[in-house]
Amino acid sequence: MSRTRPLRILALITALLLIGAACAEDERPVIVTGDNPETAARDILGTAESAGLDTLAAAIEAAGLTETLQGDGPFTVFAPNEAAFADLPDGLVALLVDEETDLLADLLLAHVAEGVHTSVELLDTGGVDSIGGSRITVETVEVPATDDEGEPTSTVEIGGQAELASADTIATNGMVHVIDTVLVPDELADRVNEAVDSIPEIVDVVSTLEEEGNFTTLLELVQTPGLDPAILGALTSEGPITVFAPTDAAFALLPEDKIQQLLDEPELLAAVLGFHVVPREVLATTVSTERYFTTAEGQGARMISLGADEYTFAGVPLTETDIIATNGVVHVVGEVLIPESAQGPGGL
């Protein structure tokens, strides 16, 4: 499966790389980034985590490659960023992390090469062989002008599929280059396609909640007359969104008069429901320790991994995670989450 996307202009990076290549015959290659002592003090996995590559870090752990990439190495890693994983078919990341870990490991090793290879060297040699056996090509390609008056530009393409997003971040046991697409070498394409075909049919968040069958109260509340239509609009939008969905049993824990209060006070209801929605996709499998997210209500909360596939959000345990929808993901909570704005006198 070849996943190509329109090339975006990375003018600054490209200029630096090309200048470096021209001057590199007798000089030490210029390192574009990676001179931050904090970054340089971390191994490859720690470098990925500090750079916000949470999905990659979680995938490395799930694939059983943590010890390898924290070892002496040295390694060069072509690290897919968050957008790269988000562009994969819906449900594939969760399937790889939860079930197809052998395929996940093979995919990740197709992004890793032995030794330290700077961007200048890679442009000069044309690429490097991955530990997985595939060739990772590195070349400058021309990007056509967008209109008749424009000038063609150039960018750095990795593996014939990805663009270089950042280069030459130094780790204690190697080097990291960030790319914007997950590389799928030809020898893994059939296995990836089979995995994609095995993903169950996915519907949007609202339809997912309806099919689950135990979110009747939540679905009724989001359609309450007078409620800000943006709440229901968010659940049916293209997303991506994350919904921390209280079950009917969770709502049953609230006193009956509080449910009536929510029905009578649309602004209060909007605050409570908004605190259950994060306007981005958050897979539990990408939370290796903890992450902070701002909800649609405005207040932030932490999602924490307790280990052994146990998680909390805003201090409340998640009873089920990573229910994939076409416009996001659903996590199930056993309690109704109450933001600060809905607490105190006159609140819940």
Image (cartoon, grey):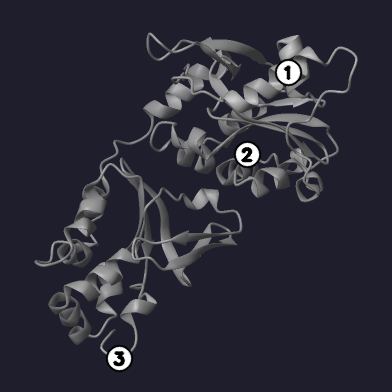
Dot 2: what SS? Answer: loop
- At a point 18% along the width and 67% down the height, the residue shown is 221
Q: Position of residue 101 (x, y in %)?
A: 57, 36
Dot 1: what SS? Answer: helix
- At a point 26% along the width and 41% down the height, the residue shown is 203
Q: Earlier in the sequence, mark 1 or mark 2?
A: 1
Label 1, label 2: how many angstroms apart (C-alpha)? 38 Å
Residue count near mark 1 (Cα–Cα under 10 Å), binned few <14, some 14–19, many ≥20:
few
Label 1, label 3: how many angstroms apart (C-alpha)? 64 Å
Give, as a three-letter code, the residue at label 1: Ile
Label 3, label 2: how many angstroms apart (C-alpha)? 49 Å
Give, as a three-letter code, the residue at label 3: Pro
Q: Is residue 71 visible?
A: yes
Front position among marks 1 and 2: 1
Residue behind mark 2:
63
Give, as a three-letter code, the residue at label 2: Ala
Front-most of residues 67 and 206: 206
Labels 3 & 2 near each other (Cβ < 8 A): no
Front-most of residues 12 and 305: 12
- Determine which of the numbered discs, if any, sits on residue 345 in the image: 3
Horizontal relation, residue 44 to residue 279: left or right: right
Residue behind mark 1:
19
Q: Earlier in the sequence, mark 3 or mark 2?
A: 2
Front-most of residues 57 and 49: 49
